[in-house]
């Protein structure tokens, strides 16, 4: 596929798996994240398969986002596909004891970071009247679970923003949609629980989704014919029925 995709959060989990999946299909890649050494390692691996450019920045920093996108060389400036994936949960606490730093991180990264990147990338799409944006939401954007409060709020916001983008970008023929996974075994819980032991138990006792499952779905979404836009997609592991119902065996 002769296209260029920009993926945020490409150093780990769903974003990294999407980079490998897209590379298989010959899509040129702009890979973003804060961990430069990981970006370099992925670039080294994938450069044999496709063209790769890396951008190291924190999506929370509006100036850095703008500078990074504007610094792209001419042959990477035409971004056909934007995967807004960077994000995490920080903490799992009841609202009355929640950490305000965690709340700031989730709103700044999952919501404002997604907006900063989108605002920097969209104008070249509207100019060309072409493009495809996929926002990685979550089952947490459809259903609130105990102690999920602010993370769920950030993902509900991602879904509202996705709908707003689809309406506003409709005159330009730009596709916009959300992919909303349930439990995916990535570094997500290590980040949420700040390296505490409980993170190791989250995906135990059932077969969780893997990052490559979501990457394959994202490739399916971006490879539909021009007239087909998958607007919203919810995917659970078979063992999961909703945010609070997961069939687990003892472990
Ligand atoms: P990972 O922790 O494995 O990956 C998160 C990615 O986001 C990393 O590449 C990280 O890169 C990047 N990132 C985090 N903070 C920032 C920041 N401030 N600036 C730039 N990049 C940042 O988790 P997942 O792959 O699971 O998460 C990817 C997305 O999927 C998130 O939006 C998450 O909410 C969503 N999701 C995850 C689910 C799950 O169960 N795992 C389920 C549903 C949705 P770096 O640290 O290098 O900056
Ligand atoms: C990640 C899924 O259920 O851990 O968005 O919040 S969950």
Image (cartoon, rainbow, N blue to C red):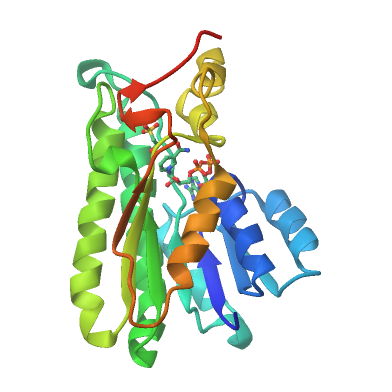
Image height of 247 relative to 9, above or below? above
Could you say where residue 188 lies in the image, as x and y percent from the top left? 50, 35
Could you say where residue 134 lies in the image, as x and y percent from the top left? 39, 63
Task: State the residue at coordinates (28%, 52%).
Answer: 158
Q: Nearer the viewer, residue 224 or 74?
A: 224
Residue 199 visible in the shown view? yes
Image height of 219 relative to 80, above or below? above
Q: Nearer the viewer, residue 193 or 68?
A: 193
Q: Nearer the viewer, residue 140 or 233?
A: 233
From the image, which quarter does the N terminus lie in?
bottom right
Left or right: residue 4 versus residue 81 is right
Could you say where residue 250 lies in the image, as x and y percent from the top left? 51, 8
Could you say where residue 30 lies in the image, as x and y percent from the top left? 59, 69
Quarter location, residue 238: top left
Task: State the residue at coordinates (28%, 28%).
Answer: 148
From the image, which quarter does the C terminus lie in?
top right
Q: Residue furthest bottom?
A: 128
Q: Residue furthest front?
A: 238
Q: Residue furthest top?
A: 250
**How many labels, in total?**
0
Residue 64 visible in the shown view? no
Task: State the residue at coordinates (31%, 51%).
Answer: 111
Left or right: residue 108 versus residue 34 is left
Left or right: residue 142 versus residue 24 is left
Task: State the residue at coordinates (62%, 74%).
Answer: 27
Image height of 134 relative to 136, above or below? below
Quarter location, residue 171: bottom left
The quarter of the rendering in which ligand 2 is drawn is top left
């Amino acid at each position: 596929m002769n296209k260029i995709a920009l993926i945020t959060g490409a150093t780990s989990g769903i974003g990294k798996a999407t980079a490998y999946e897209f590379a298989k299909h010959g899509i040129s890649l702009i890979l973003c994240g804060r961990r430069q050494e990981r970006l370099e390692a992925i670039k080294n691996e994938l450069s044999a398969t496709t063209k790769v450019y890396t951008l190291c920045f924190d999506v929370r920093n509006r100036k850095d986002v703008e500078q990074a996108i504007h610094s792209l060389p001419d042959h990477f400036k035409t971004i056909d596909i934007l995967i807004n994936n960077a994000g995490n949960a920080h903490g799992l606490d009841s609202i009355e004891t929640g950490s305000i730093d965690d709340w700031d991180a989730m709103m700044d990264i999952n919501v404002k970071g997604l907006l900063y990147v989108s605002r920097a990338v969209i104008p070249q799409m509207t100019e060309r009247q072409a493009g495809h944006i996929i926002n990685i939401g979550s089952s947490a954007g459809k259903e609130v679970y105990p102690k999920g409060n602010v993370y769920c709020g950030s993902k509900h916001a991602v879904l509202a923003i996705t709908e707003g983008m689809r309406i506003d970008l409709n005159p330009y023929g730009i596709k916009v949609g959300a992919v909303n996974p349930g439990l995916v075994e990535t570094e997500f819980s290590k980040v949420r629980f700040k390296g505490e032991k409980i993170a190791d138990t989250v995906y135990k006792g059932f077969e969780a989704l893997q990052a490559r499952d979501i990457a394959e779905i994202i490739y399916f979404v971006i490879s539909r014919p021009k007239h087909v836009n998958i607007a919203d997609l919810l995917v659970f592991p078979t063992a999961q029925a909703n945010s609070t119902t997961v069939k687990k065996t003892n472990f």
